[in-house]
Image (cartoon, rainbow, N blue to C red):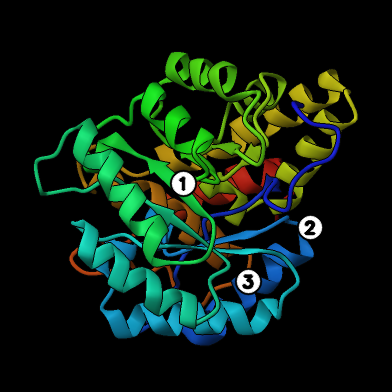
Amino acid sequence: MSSPVPSRFHGVIPPVVTPRTSSGEIDVPSLERVTQHLLDGGVDGLFVLGSSGEVTHMTNSERDTVVRTIAGVNAGAVPLMVGAVEQTTNRVIEEARRVVSLGAEALVVTSQYYAISNAAETDTHYRSIHAAVDVPIFAYDVPVRTHFKLPVDLLVSLGADGILAGVKDSSGDDVSFRQLLLAAKNIPNFDIFTGHEVVVDGALLGGAQGAVPGLANVDPRGYKNLYEAAKAGDWAKAAAEQDRLADVFNIVFTPKPGRLSGNAAGLGAFKTALQLMGIVDTNTMSAPMLALDADEAEAIRVILTRNGLL
């Protein structure tokens, strides 16, 4: 680990899934149970309105409901990071101000998307948002969705200037991630998180401050155990827990090939697991995504059972 005294933003910060009713509404009681499940699992923070929360499928009213609900259950127990995910700078600023008013303690912000941008405009994007809101901002590097990989030198510059408080890296580019860790290791108050599910131990060994794995919705305690082992320097224990979690992650491969989009398959697997565990009432996805079927759910049940989650 890069620092003996972790900052306020560290450890396991799950990107909270958003349960829906069978008719497609936000399922508030199920969302309350998911939030409590995560807190009971010992998580160090909550990331709301991210990709795992299906943020781009929500109306503004639904986003407000989700943030209010999670903030209410959390009641200040752990830091609340909220995605301000919109296409362009002015829209992000408007979204950021709204979610801060609802309880966001930090923002997670992508580069512009749909708009065709470059590094110089992305620099201006983050500096403009920083000037407009008075909470920490984390860059969300997710090129599979934005079609723009955030350059290491840009992130380091923004971190050194105090514009960014850190990075949530969901790029899947392990070389770039390691380069970022090395380049940023002497920047104070700049916290770097991996969005990976299956190489968290390696990311922590390299100096990351924590992880934001979608699978932590299902097994928050497993990821917390991994993090605590890494923090204690027990890398063999951390690797053993990561190996078990890698097997749990096989739930995302249970949907029949080609039946669902990649988005629906992965997030749907998390929701289906939570339904089997009795935490959410349905595995309904945001329209137009389809839910996993009974055969796919049964395959997930097998995986959860062999890993002690049922």
Q: Is residue 248 left or right of residue 112?
A: right
Question: Residue at the location (26% across, 45% down)?
Answer: 124
Does any portion of residue 22 appear in the rendered image?
Answer: no
The amino acid sitting under disc 3 is Thr
Taking depth in this image into account, of 59 and 120 the one nearest to the observer is: 120
- Compared with residue 110, is residue 63 higher up or lower down, i.e. above or below? below
The amino acid sitting under disc 1 is Ile
Label 1 vs label 3, nearer the camera: 1
Instruction: Give the labeled residue for mark 3.
Output: 35
The answer to which quarter of the image holds residue 218 is bottom right
* C-alpha span from label 1 to label 3: 30 Å
Label 1 Cα crowd, 10 Å radius (few <14 / some 14-19 / many 20+): many
Question: Residue at the location (76% across, 31% down)?
Answer: 241
The answer to which quarter of the image holds residue 236 is top right
Label 3, secondary structure: give it.
helix
The amino acid sitting under disc 2 is Gly
Q: Is residue 175 left or right of residue 88?
A: right
Label 2 Cα crowd, 10 Å radius (few <14 / some 14-19 / many 20+): some
Q: Residue 120 in the image: state x and y as whole percent.
A: 22, 34
Taking depth in this image into account, of 104 and 211 the one nearest to the observer is: 104
- Any mark on residue 163, and which? 1
Q: Residue 230 in the image: state x and y as whole percent.
A: 81, 29
Instruction: Give the labeled residue for mark 2.
Output: 42
- Compared with residue 281, is residue 177 higher up or lower down, i.e. above or below? above
Q: Residue 27 in the image: state x and y as whole percent.
A: 45, 83
Q: Are marks 1 and 3 in contact (CB under 8 Å)?
A: no
Label 2, secondary structure: give it.
loop
Label 2 vs label 1, nearer the camera: 1
Q: Are marks 2 and 1 in contact (CB under 8 Å)?
A: no
- Any mark on residue 137, and which? none
Label 1, secondary structure: give it.
loop
